[in-house]
Amino acid sequence: MNGTSSLFKAYDKHFKIGAAVSCVTAGIFKDILGQHFNSITPENELKYSSTEPEEGQFTFDEADKIFDVARSLGIKVRAHAPVWHTQTPDWMYVDGKKPAAPELIYERIEAHTKVLCERYNNDVYAWDVVNEAACDDPNDLSDTYRDSEYFKLCGEKFIEKAFKAMDKYSPNNQLFYNDYSECIPAKRERIVRLIRTLQERGCRIDGFGMQQHHFAAPDYDEIKRSIETYASLGLRLHITELDVSLMATLNEGERRLKPGDPGFAEYIKEALRPTPERLAMIEDIYLKLFEIYRSYSDVIDCVTTWGVADDFTWLDDFGVDKDMPKVKQHPLLFDTEHKAKGCVDTLIERA
Ligand code: GLA
């Protein structure tokens, strides 16, 4: 035993322990955050749709609630995902009735970056500057970039511009690129290409955010290989959105049936039965993942779970049909009663 009942204190020698919170859950989970976490990520509150719903009209009420909680706990914020293909209002992409020219988009990104940084820089230690810009179309292996609205209008240059703007207004915080399915070899190659291009163009990119959403049994060897590959680019690594869906206890490899696939209805019914064995498997996956993260703590600086407890998680309506009732996927380290799952003690013991 290492004599503490706090995850973040136990992991102090390895990396920070973070949680994503909303403006609502930041208050609800304040005590758990204070006891176990030393990094906070706003789930949606720093995205364009939350902070600049109309061009030039900024709203910070929701983000401020999270920053207030973070300040009162003495925790610095891992700021998340302004430039992203979703949760961005349409004004970004148009100029009156015409599509916006690239230069106008870059000006808008720069103006937004300036306002956000001036408001929050002192309470932030890292920014996910651009989120999910790599293509993940399994049928088109040649493409590096996602065919987003940003990409259609600007080509890949918007990524570079976003990093340069953030570097200008946030020179003392770490700058990250963040993405998912980051351990699948084909996607990993694209992410590497994207990051190398930024480096070649002289962008300051300090780190890569490995989201680590698990919907299928993790391929632990690929996770290790990915950590090594990303670290070999000279980057610091953060695990940014860790959660382990109940589906991960059923799916083999990367196979996950999606709504519309043949046999989906039976599959999802089975996938979401929270048997004691499956709930225990989720905890076991956490233990194995943390074992890997600890073994790479020379390059990993933070491990963030995407939420705190199972009663507030985006997964309640992910991966199921729109008409289906919400489902519990039990993906986090604290249960719906806000009690630490058994694996939390074990994670502390093994730290
Ligand atoms: C992605 C984004 C996050 C969040 C999650 C789902 O992974 O990076 O900001 O929206 O999806 O909640």
Image: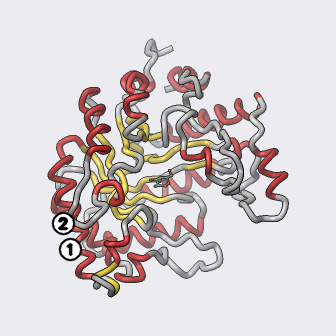
Q: Secondary structure at mark 2?
A: helix
Q: Quadrant of residue 7?
A: top left
Q: Which residue is mark 2?
A: 111
Q: Is residue 234 visible?
A: no
Q: Quadrant of residue 177?
A: bottom left
* Label 2 with label 1: CB-CB less than 8 Å: yes
Q: How is the image coloured?
A: secondary structure
**In the rendered view, would you say 234 is above or below 126?**
below
Picture coordinates of residue 346, whole percent (x, y): 57, 22
Q: Secondary structure at mark 1?
A: helix
Residue at the limit of the structure toward the bottom, as seen here: 98
Residue in view at x 29 percent, y 33 percent = 70
Q: Residues within 10 Å of mark 2 (few under 14, many from 20)?
A: some
Q: Which residue is mark 1?
A: 107
Q: Residues within 10 Å of mark 1 (few under 14, many from 20)?
A: some
Q: Is residue 9 left or right of residue 265?
A: left
Frontmost residue, 168 versus 320 = 320
Residue in view at x 60 percent, y 26 percent = 343
Name the residue type under label 1: Glu
Picture coordinates of residue 89, whole percent (x, y): 37, 66
| Label 2 – label 1 distance at C-alpha | 6 Å
**In the rendered view, would you say 145 is above or below 83?**
below
Q: Quadrant of residue 108?
A: bottom left
Name the residue type under label 2: Ala
